[in-house]
Amino acid sequence: MPTRKVHSALEALRSQLPVGSPLSAVTLSSIGDRVLVRDDDSTWEPDSGQLLMDLVEAPAQTPRETTALNVTVSKGTAAPTEADDDPTADDWYDAALDLEAESPDEAMVSYERAIALDPRHSDALLNLGRLHHEAGRLDRAEDCYRQAIEADVDNARALFNLGVVREDLGAEREAIASYERALEVEPTLAVAHFNLSRLHEQAGRRDEALQHLMAYRRSVGVGG
């Protein structure tokens, strides 16, 4: 399977997991050209958010190592060096993806190098923001998400993450606005529907909460 397809699935997965939840909490596997994610309760496709329910079952007694996709890091060689011929912003971005699992601090440096070369690299800005977010640096995370959106106004993941950090900062009205904008870009973004349902429920807006809950269930393939 192409590395970039795996990276794309990982990026989608990171937006679906709670902030701070490690990738080791789930198992990645593949069937044909599809990347699947499994936790204790379900299996889904991270790119679409589609639950597979009982359509995919792990063979009984099959060791996890035979199905899991490993994201490996070549220590000392993952990041470009000064000796490399003019590494591009994408080179630094790809290096940062490989470094995240074992060395978030080094990954942040690589994302910053990518952004220095391309200040409008929205994916690098998004991921740098997420790393700040996971480390509790909420103001810096919010700034990165805003810059990612300025670079790509239709970046649904950046809009969603901005909503999450706004919630964490106690700005629930602004969080709702961010989630709604994310859904304008990507109407089937299940996690945005889920968070909107929760926020409306907390505020006593039962009709809006139910509307988004049903949209969430449709997006992940559970009922209608």
Image: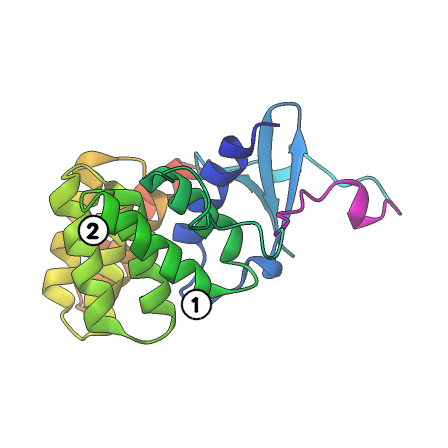
Q: Main secondary structure of the magenta part?
A: loop
- Foreground pick, 84 / 191: 84
Residue located farthest toward the top when viewing the structure as drawn? 32
- Foreground pick, 106 / 66: 106
Q: Residue at x 49, y 58 (%)?
A: 100
Image position of 123 (left or right of 152):
right
Image position of 182 (left or right of 16):
left
Residue mark closest to the camera, 1 vs 2: 1
Q: Residue at x 61, y 56 (%)?
A: 75
Check if residue 67 falls in the magenta segment.
Answer: yes
Q: Give x and y (percent) for residue 115.
A: 25, 50
The answer to whether residue 194 of the structure is visible from this angle is no
Residue range (magenta): 61-73
Q: Residue at x 18, y 47 (%)?
A: 119
Instruction: Report crowding for label 1: few under 14, some 14 to 19, many 20 or more residues within 10 A (C-alpha).
Output: some
**Quadrant including the N terminus:** top right
Image position of 7 (left or right of 215):
right
Dot 2 amino acid type: Tyr
Task: Indicate the quadrant where residue 184 lies.
Answer: top left
The answer to whether residue 220 of the structure is visible from this angle is yes
Residue 179: numbered disc = 2
* SS type, badge 1: helix
Task: Indicate the quadrant where residue 132 lies.
Answer: bottom left
Q: Give x and y (percent) for residue 38.
A: 62, 48
Residue tagged 1: 105
Check if residue 157 falls in the magenta segment.
Answer: no
Dot 1 amino acid type: Asp
